[in-house]
Image (cartoon, rainbow, N blue to C red):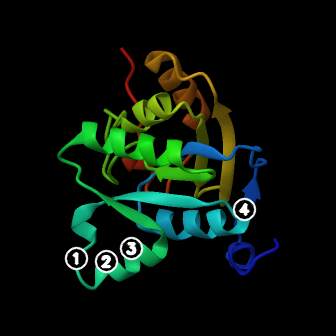
Amino acid sequence: MKTFSGKILKILGWKITGQFPDIKKSIFIFAPHTSYFDAFYGKLYLNEIDINHKFISKKELFVFPGNFIMTKFGSIPVDTTNGRTIILSIANRLKKSKELHIVISPEGQMAKNTKWKKGFYYMANRANVPIIIAYLDFTKKEVGIKDVIYDTSNLNSVMQQINEMYKNVLGKHPDNFVLEILK
């Protein structure tokens, strides 16, 4: 562990798994998202691997004094009532950046959700960047990378791959994490 964040993870009993790929831009999904602690451990991990990243957070969190905290945390506000605008905005941001990883929780909420938000897929597809599959497993106290999905040409295929990668991962509140129910 090379950074202060890495040392905190180690003191708390967490280990980092997987190697961060040599990728300059991505949509970086983190799951399961069942607790506010996810952001804490996720941020420690992202600081340890030292990548340029921004979290997507709903704009309602950016009200004084939360706006200072959210901005310092590395979040960018989005209006969740217009998904298409978010997708275009993030895709353009990625296209214009030399190095940027957009961090998203694909479930879209901490409560049980069998219908994941697909904005992450459309952002990756539109920006022509891969999807990095990251995870937090509270039972094993692991945080890291599962794999990378480079081919984003087929939504069903991407979701099947994601389901396979997350099938044995447990969040802080395991009953609140369910995989996308595929049709």
Q: Position of residue 78 (x, y in %)?
A: 29, 55
Q: Are marks 1 and 3 in contact (CB under 8 Å)?
A: no
The residue wearing badge 4 is 49
Q: Amino acid at mark 3?
A: Met
Q: Residue at x 65, y 69 (%)?
A: 47
Indicate which disc, 1 or 4, sits on the residue closer to the N terminus: 4
- Would residue 174 be seen by someone viewing this image from the given angle? yes
Q: Nearer the viewer, residue 91 or 56?
A: 91
Q: 10 Å neighbourhood of mark 1: few (<14), some, or many (≥20)?
A: few
Q: Secondary structure at mark 3?
A: helix
Q: Calculate the distance from the C-alpha at mark 1 to the C-alpha at mark 2.
A: 5 Å
Q: Are marks 1 and 2 in contact (CB under 8 Å)?
A: yes
Q: Calculate the distance from the C-alpha at mark 2 to the C-alpha at mark 4.
A: 25 Å
Which numbered dot is residue 50? Answer: none
Which numbered dot is residue 63? Answer: 1
Q: Amino acid at mark 2?
A: Asn
Q: Quadrant of the C terminus?
A: top left
Q: Nearer the viewer, residue 19 or 27?
A: 27
The residue wearing badge 3 is 70
Q: Are marks 4 and 3 in contact (CB under 8 Å)?
A: no
Indicate which disc, 1 or 3, sits on the residue closer to the N terminus: 1
The residue furthest left is 81
Q: Quadrant of the N terminus?
A: bottom right
Q: Are marks 2 and 3 in contact (CB under 8 Å)?
A: yes
- Would residue 168 be seen by someone viewing this image from the given angle? no
The residue wearing badge 2 is 67
Q: Nearer the viewer, residue 5 or 98?
A: 98
Q: Position of residue 176 (x, y in %)?
A: 37, 49
